Image: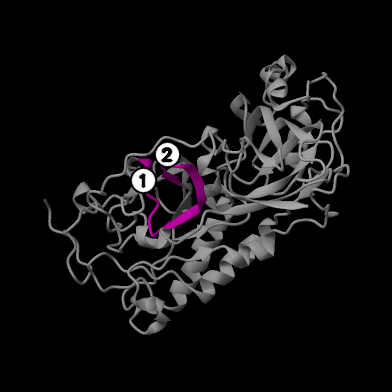
Amino acid sequence: MRYSILLPALASLAFAQDPVAVADNPDPTPDSLPLEDLRDIPVPTYTVATGVLEQDIPYATESAVAVIAAEIAATPLSVFPAATDVPINSAGEAGANDDEAADANVIVNTGSKLKRALTGIARQPLRKRGNCQPEGPVSDNFYPIDVSSPEAFKADAHIAEAANKAEPPAGYYQNFKNKPAANSAMNYLGYSVIQSGKYDVQYCANKCDAKAGCLSFNIYFERDPAIGPNAADCPNPDGTLRVKCSYWGTGLDEKTLTNPGQWRAKFWVTIAGSNAYTSYKMDGPVSGWTGPQKLGTNAINAPLYDCENRWSYLGYKLLQAGSVDPNLCAAACDAQTKYNAAHPTATDPYPCNAFGSYILNKNNATGTYQQGQMCTFYTANWDAKYAKNTGSSDPSIGAKYTYTHSTFYGKEGVALTCPAPTEDFVSKAGLYIKGGQKPTSQ
């Protein structure tokens, strides 16, 4: 049996966040978020197989890179500078690229193709829900833990003791400890049941290390039904124990801690003793690129022009499948350079010499949801001092967008921050001159 997790559906649960303050964005800039496009983009979902010892959702970097490069070749970025009609390549000229040429910012939501190429739930035996039959592998009750009721389970001192004693394994740092809920994030890569019943953090780490694209894991105790609940014949069966590791191609934190369990007939699947760990491989180096500059919760707000008098911002891609992998942004950046060289403007081919990568989070009154990996592209390798973009608000839907794990990479051999731009060239509303000329000094 499988069940799908739709992250916004968790809104009514006890772990929903307080409403966020949403205000209009002052002085929007060319590389600020395209709010009108983001409104229609769904939060990523995932599907969990039940009644099996392990679920494996594969990821392959080489396949992902090939998909991204092919998509750029088929649908190149075509970003018009604010209040100008100068495209970055010939595909941006009116009528040259179908309807997309007329868009002020063309967002490419790389989801379905990448998902088909990279992910797929491994074939698992399906089990019918509610048949009052045993439901697959369980864990030994090693400690032992009281599973007689949800209340007794959550109060059992063995759970807190095991979770609090656990230390981060080598190569990982801890995100949180001993929580009564599991993670729901993007880029789900499957789970394992620890049959020994031990709270074995190293076991989870070994599994994650061996799994392509795995950047974090969540370990927790789960009280499950011993047999499949049936509303008529066995609505609230006896409980049994599973110790689980879930694997993710993203970074984890307490804001992704949004799954406290679920009802199955009259049986409440209960979670306790939840710890999470993220790999230091997250935000790692990329071959052929300098950095990364680690920007935390900020993103680059670049000057309008680089030292070659080129419009610096080239556009972006939002990735919603696979793993948070800066190699994908790098592949897209290189593919865009290749395309622009073959389709230059009258004055310049506009190379992609730098990119940013961050997790885009959508915050509203129901909670915080990871929306995808955002890649942003530039002609110049900008310094971290330009990382002044802290997010955007969309009052029309009561949402605020924020960033985590924000990084910035430059092409090897390209100088970090060319000397010509001054603060006068930083984007401000109303300062753009039609034709793409530099704004006057303020």
Residue at the image point whose x is 75% and y is 35% from the top? 244
Q: CA distance from mark 1 to mark 2?
A: 9 Å
- Judge the density around disc 1: few (<14), some (14-19), many (≥20) Cα neighbours within 10 Å: some
Tell me where residue 29 appears, x and y as whole percent: 28, 55
Residue at the image point whose x is 66% and y is 40% from the top? 262
Mark 2 residue type: Thr
Q: Are marks 1 and 2 in contact (CB under 8 Å)?
A: yes
Tell me where residue 231 appears, x and y as whole percent: 75, 45
Q: Which residue is mark 2?
A: 297
Q: As displayed, is residue 428 above or below residue 199?
A: below
Confirm whether residue 34 shows in the render: no
Q: Which residue is mark 1?
A: 391
Q: As displayed, is residue 10 above or below residue 62?
A: above
Confirm whether residue 322 shows in the render: yes
Mark 1 residue type: Gly
Left or right for 405, reference 181: left
The magenta segment: 362-384
Query: Which colour scheme appears in the figure?
Result: one colour
Q: As displayed, is residue 310 above or below residue 138?
A: below
Quarter assignment of residue 348: bottom left
Residue at the image point whose x is 63% and y is 46% from the top? 249
The residue tagged with tag 1: helix, strand or loop?
loop
Left or right for 23, reference 105: left
Return the residue nearer the eye: 9 or 439. Answer: 9
Return the residue nearer the eye: 28 or 401. Answer: 401
Return the residue nearer the eye: 162 or 58. Answer: 162
Tell me where residue 18 appears, x and y as whole percent: 41, 35
